[in-house]
Image: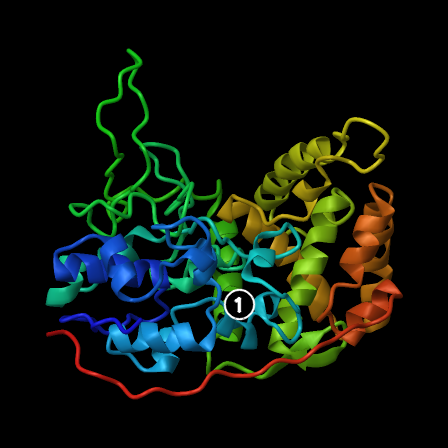
Amino acid sequence: MTRRPLSRSLDPLADETLVGFLLRLARHNGTTPDQIAARMGLMGPADGTPGIVSPWLLADMDKPRLVRVARAAHLTVPEASKLLLAPMGHRYGIVSRRYQPWTSPQQLDRPNRWVFMRTSQFCPPCLAGDDDPLGLLYGGAWKRSWRLPMVFACSRHQRLLSSICPECRTPGQYAAKGLIARASAEDLHPAQCRATAQPNRTGEVRRSVCGSNLARIRPPRPPGDADSLRVLLALQQRLDALLSADGPQKVNSCGQLVPVAQYFIDLRVVATLVLASWPEASAFAATPTLAQAIGREAEQRLRDSRRRTSGASKRPFGISSLLSPLDSPLTMGAVLGIAERLLDVRERRWTGMVVGPLYDSARTLHRDTFQKLARLPGTSSGLQGVLRVAKETTDSADPEIYIRGPRNG
């Protein structure tokens, strides 16, 4: 079916997600996000529920659909592709088909994939947009990088990211069904919370939608000391440099230079071992405040991991809690700081003496789970050697180009 292109479109903002682009296009055209999605060919029986945009389209699309989306929004195919998560795999190997093979985008939502598919972190000042006319009207970008747990702070505004709306306590951009919550609502700004409003003290709902302006909320409570915030912001700047398209191609991991995409997989594995074996690595925390934050999270997750399924299964029901990324940007940064420090040592033997015991401790919780984690495709040969397991890899292809059309009309 041939669809007529939108009469007015917009330039995608730097690092913008498909979700944010749809919200801004809807505002720009005076219509609803679901109408824009339909015009762009993002709805169809093949995606599941009729009339709902599949959330997995945020991860990747087949080439014919991507071309249709690009034409409808007057974009090039590379521009449309950059609204998705999969192309970030060249840097962030956890969403890479080469290093982390996946046959469907749904697999990115599993606990062993560190990516927020159903929600997004956010920086309120970034959502407020710049002072240009379009920024004042529609706000800033809902960034792709905010979907990555390894991005926990905004280097530009020197603050930790927020993860939930303070008014309704709902994760940012969370939609129970589909890609966008309240996709048929026409009067919501791209920066407004689209979750259902919480009841007041009398049990009555004040309004059907929260509607809080996430660009104006107060920043989350900073760490208890300035040194902890300084350490986290410096770490985020280093990770941002690795994620940048013009960043280094290789970085040290376990005493050898590896592709950046593989480094992020190594970082994810070691961060998980730090949490699962806590307090084994507590001496490597940058500050006591950060060590305490990890301790509180580890205690809860270790308690959850010991819950078991009913019946004959011996697998801990909550073991996935130790494999999933952390919800708190503060704790996420604290754990990543330790993992970075352990991987950065030039002497592999020293790394083995430290990381090896973390792995052994984690395996006492559930041997098969953590042996599978240690063999995660894409981990570097250096880390594989430290953990004494075999290495696995795969390959993938790149997108092509389409001709740009008019927009901002």
Residue 382 placement: quadrant? bottom right
Q: Is residue 140 visible?
A: no
Check disc 1 and give the amino acid type: Leu
- Judging depth in this view, the residue of 285 and 161 nearest the camera is 161
Q: Is residue 88 above or below residue 230?
A: below
**In the picture provided, is 112 more to the left or to the right than 357?**
left
Image position, residue 243 (x, y; %):
50, 72
Q: For this rendering, which residue is in front, 33 or 232?
A: 33
Identify which residue is drawn at 69% across, 32% down: 304
- Name the spot of residue 156 as percent of width and height, x first: 35, 64
Residue reaching furthest top? 202
Above or below 238: residue 328: above
Q: Choose between 141 and 23: the one closer to the eye.
A: 23
Where is residue 167? Give x, y as percent.
Answer: 31, 32
Q: Answer left or right for 259 relative to 350.
A: left
Q: Provide residue 117's location: percent of width, then percent of height.
A: 49, 54
Is 123 placed above or below 308 here? below
10 Å neighbourhood of mark 1: few (<14), some, or many (≥20)? some
Place residue 146 in its image quadrant: bottom left
Residue lying farthest to the front in this orientation: 1
Q: Secondary structure at mark 1?
A: helix
The quadrant in which residue 222 appears is top left
**What residue is rendered at 22% in x and 83% in y?**
405
Give the labeled residue for mark 1. 239
Q: Residue at x 32, y 82 (%)?
A: 76
Q: Quadrant of the C terminus?
A: bottom left
Q: Quadrant of the N terminus?
A: bottom left
Q: Residue at x 57, y 46 (%)?
A: 326
Q: Is residue 257 left or right of residue 7?
A: right
